Amino acid sequence: MHIFLAGATGAVGRSLIPLLIENGHTVAGPTRSAAKADLLRSLGAAPVVVDGLDRDAVRSAVAAERPDAIVHQMTALTGMADLRRFEQAFAVTNRLRTEGTDHLVAAARDAGVERIVAQSYTGWPYARTGGPVKTEDDPLDADPPRQMRSTLDAIRHLEQAVTGAGGVVLRYGGFYGPGTGLVPGGEQWDAVRARRFPLVGDGGGVWSFTHIQDAAGAVLAVLEDHRPGELYNAVDDDPAPVREWLPALAAAAGAPPPRHVPRLVARLMGEHLVTLMCEVRGASNAKLRHELGWTPRWPTWREGFAALERSRAAA
């Protein structure tokens, strides 16, 4: 297949391009910056300079490439080390999840492209009721804190637009690994090392993680066994509360244990901090495993964080 990979220079894109090529596919790699063309060529993709928020440019680029599939991995995830500015950190990503998604869906329709795969997120959007681990059949949060509402609205928009067009949505967990902020030298890693990532309350919020290589593998699985209109949680096998994974991450980063902040104090900095640290639910990958035979290369963050520690020690 010829793949139009929107978000080709992002963390998932950079892991996905070589994987697609190894499996016999060709890749057109859109980028807003001509300066990144050489990076895309080095990975094996044909660069296409286009802004994902420019409707006409996107439609022209897709028409010119005539792809067999469109993969939407566009995000702008910066400033993620400071959770107090949650809404601000996701502002551009939310535009890419709404406007950018609509442009790609329209371009796919015009070009007769039936296979669309898009990136969504499952790290916190599920309803904060019931058990600690959710499936794709469970509802999303009906009343998130104010700072999280625009981002959840954008996630809902993306999922409805893509599945409504017969595409497939992959809900990733928290990213870690090469090209992400959670790797030695990354902004989240450094925040943990500097003890700027506290443990709030009982740390009972359950998080799911996705190694960036497993995110790429999930895209390949969905492309090669396309099931129109489906949603899949693409996460590891080990949802875990913050009180387990955050101290382990601090140890991997060679840092002291995280500071503890009471719920009442954290609430003064933003209700969403309490939600993220104490209330969110994890996600099950059983559907993706059962229907498509996908298995994560990194089945647990425990192994993955240890690998990050080894890479830090070897540096």
Image: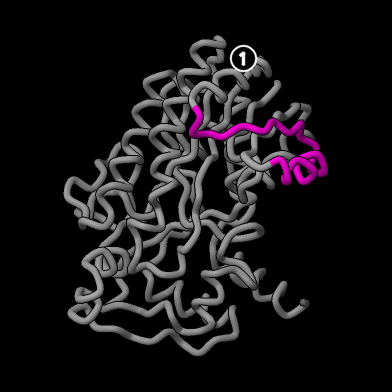
Q: Does residue 48 show up magenta in the picture? A: yes
Residue 163 position within the rendered picture, expressed as x and y whole percent measured from the top left: 40, 25
The residue that appears at 37% across and 76% down in the rendered structure is 243
Residue 291 visible in the current orientation: no
Quarter where residue 254 is shown: bottom right
The residue that appears at 29% across and 59% down in the rendered structure is 280
Residue 173 vs 68, above or below: the answer is below
The residue that appears at 26% across and 78% down in the rendered structure is 201
Left or right: residue 103 compared with residue 150: right
Q: Quadrant of the C terminus?
A: bottom right
Range drawn in magenta: 34-54
Residue 303 vs 109, above or below: the answer is below
User: Badge 1 is on which residue?
Assistant: 63
The residue that appears at 48% across and 25% down in the rendered structure is 55
Q: Residues within 10 Å of mark 1 (few under 14, many from 20)?
A: some
Residue 109 vs 256, above or below: the answer is above
Amino acid at the residue labelled 1: Ala
Residue 157 position within the rendered picture, expressed as x and y whole percent measured from the top left: 33, 33
Looking at the picture, the colour scheme in use is one colour
Residue 8 vs 177, above or below: the answer is above
Residue 307 position within the rendered picture, expressed as x and y whole percent measured from the top left: 67, 69
Residue 166 position within the rendered picture, expressed as x and y whole percent measured from the top left: 44, 19
User: Is disc 1 placed on a helix, strand or loop?
Assistant: helix
Q: Does residue 51 show up magenta in the picture? A: yes
Q: Quadrant of the N terminus?
A: top right
Quarter where residue 223 is shown: top right
- Residue lying at the far bottom of the rendered structure: 256
Residue 167 visible in the current orientation: yes
Please state the total of marks drawn on the protein image.
1
